[in-house]
Image: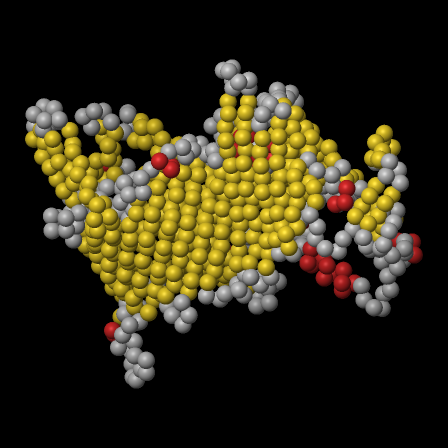
Amino acid sequence: SSDLGKDAVTGPAYMVLAGLPLPLAVPFGYFPFSEKYSSGIIFPTFGDDYNRGYYLSNGGYYFAISQNMDLALTGEIYTLGSWGLRAQSSYLKRYKYSGNFNISYLKTITGDKGMPDYSKSTNFQVLWSHSQDSKANPNMSLSASVNFTTSGYTRNDLNSYYSNAFTENTKSSTVNMTYRFPNSKWSLSTTANVSQRSQDSTLAVSFPNVTITMSQLYPFKRKRAVGDEKWYEKIKISYSGQFNNSLTAKQDEFFKKSLIKDWRNGMKHSVPVSATFNVFKYINITPSINLTDRMYTTKVRREWDPIAGNEKLDTTYSFYNVWDFSGSVSFDTKVYGFFQPLPFLGNKVKMIRHVITPTISFTGSPDFASPFFGYYGSYEYNDSQGRLQKKEYSMFPNSLFGVPGRGKTGSISFSLANNLEMKVRDDNDSIGERKISLIENLTLSQSYNFAADSMRWSNLNTSVMLRLMKNFNLNLSATWDVYTYALNSSGNPVRVNKLRLSEGKGWGKLMSTGTSFSYTFNNDTFKKWFGGGDDKDKEKKNTDNNTPDTPIDDDMSPQQGGPRRTNNKKNGIQIGENGYMAWNVPWNLTFNYSVNYGYGDFDYKKLEYKGKITQNLSVSGNIRPTSNWNFGFSASYNFDRHKIAYMNCNISRDMHCFTMRASFVPVGPYKSYNFHISVKSSLLADLKYDKRSSMSNGVRW
């Protein structure tokens, strides 16, 4: 070797794998050392793909730009013409910001030119993550999470086969900047959102979105109050303003759309005014007024062309205000009920408490479809049978923030929230008792519209939350249909103005409900369930036993009468309390399950909708049978087809100086595998071997 810390040179060397010499050798080795960041060549990976031929991938050059930023330019090339480029960079400035970006470009060519199976496609991916340190600026924050991918990228990127991104149908990107004005209630936020749907190559872009808000304030409150608070001092007001600009279109048509004619844009101003008063000591009254103003740039008028026999549109571009308002008043209180069980039922239960929170609200607004407001229009035409018909329409179709509804509103809403708790005796508790939640929350809500000419009752909405276990709550929401159905002149089912209660079918029929939950099992799960205690208790117990008066010798045996520690090691093997090798296999298994119930097919005999259940299940797990082996998998199950929809498995082995990984998709149309073995040392990272298959290799398991 030369000067210390600069470089090193070795003589001949050969590879030994798990104690087995291999016929792979090098005549000499040269290892440059440097205390500074340095640029260098990234050695590519060699492999073959059934569709694209032999390839070199992930090879290129690494640029050590500075201590705050780097850049890696890599590429891939295939013998049948496909190629790709990638740029990756990470940046960091302490107490300021940090982030990374990844830009990939793929040109994929499959088949022979001039043949029916020949295809050429271009795809790219942009990944960017940025976060600002809170110390950089207390009034402004900037964050970004960008995942923009063309629809065919994951199907042509070999690395995507063995990641969860392969099964994602939607991808979203968000860039947000928020500024809070110092010593003020005002704040400004601007965002850019992009949502992609891979199934049909649809892009939904919303940019720019600007929101300005004023937090709640009391404009009539005295700065120096003398005496009791006046009623008008309880009035509070806030403000929210939005400007949005959005477009939803197919990926290949997106840049062909007109900014004026196709993009949807508008502004919206919301000013809620409210106050809360207490009457009769137990009842809270909250009157409120909500003012909303929408600003649009297009207006569409329609008329009937009797000569052409169709509808004509006249679109004008100007500045239009669409405003509305509504008023409401609500009453709420709390009612407490206590029940003490009878003595012959035992003295374990001390008391049961039931808390009822009823709320009644009145809401009203005028008919904004009247000609006075000018939001709706109408025209007359003769139908195919010569009868005169009248059609009403909105002059702001597909508007970003909608238009006020038709008809007067005057409704009353009812809501009833319930909480049920039980107090029981517990000798293990410090106060000798503890509370058990029987029903954390059970809420029922419904409304009645006085101004409607029919269907005045709304659906009944219910929600319940049960605290089943210490760390597990069951949340369930449901909607109940209160009206019956009949067949129209065309034989199709329609909702009619007849309550189910009047037909003897009960108050409501379950219309939709659903819930989802996830749980992770691991080594400590069953110990906690069946009284094994947790790790903290064990650590505390061990600490208490290891007092200074009891010396501990790691080599003491049970015959010597000394304590036996579970972390004793002999020849690299961990010894348990009984003197045998300790068996410790870390593992975890996570279940994610969701079930939803809704209306399905219509039963024409019973004039009722049949129920339909939709289920989703995904499972992922990991196990380490030894300190060197690791097995993991993730899978999703399709309940409609009764088979596994997708599965990804991975195996890794730590071989001291080497590491080996294998990933494979055993089922489905993307069945494939990936094998990798390399030297662990970063200096010898280019000594590696990769073997891949494509989804069309015809791999048989």
**Looking at the image, can residue 628 be seen?**
no
Q: Work out which residue is located at the far bottom of the displayed protein and give it.
A: 226
| Frontmost residue, 355 versus 609 | 609
User: Residue 98 falls in which quadrant of the image?
Assistant: bottom right
Give the position of the C terminus as an image quadrant.
Answer: top right
Quadrant assignment, res 18: top right
- Foreground residue among 271 and 269: 269
Query: Is residue 605 visible from the viewing direction of this image?
Result: yes
Residue depicted at 43% across the width and 42% down the height: 195
Using residue 87 as the reference point, say whether residue 502 is left or right of it: left
Image point (25%, 52%), residue name: 295
Q: Which residue is drawn at 57% across and 66% down?
A: 432
Image point (40%, 55%), residue name? 190
Above or below, 577 relative to 238: above
Q: Position of residue 155 (x, y in %)?
A: 53, 30
Q: Is residue 95 above or below residue 191?
A: below
227 lies above or below 494: below
Q: How many labels does the image show?
A: 0
Residue at the limit of the structure toward the right, as seen here: 560
Is 151 displayed left or right of 394 in the figure?
right
What is the basis of the colouring in this image? secondary structure
Position in image of residue 420 (x %, y %): 43, 56
**Relative to the observer, which residue lies in front, 341 or 180?**
180
On the image, the x and y values in percent for residue 69 come to 61, 53
Q: Give percent across and percent down for residue 7.
A: 82, 50
In depth, the one of 661 and 96 nearer the eye is: 96
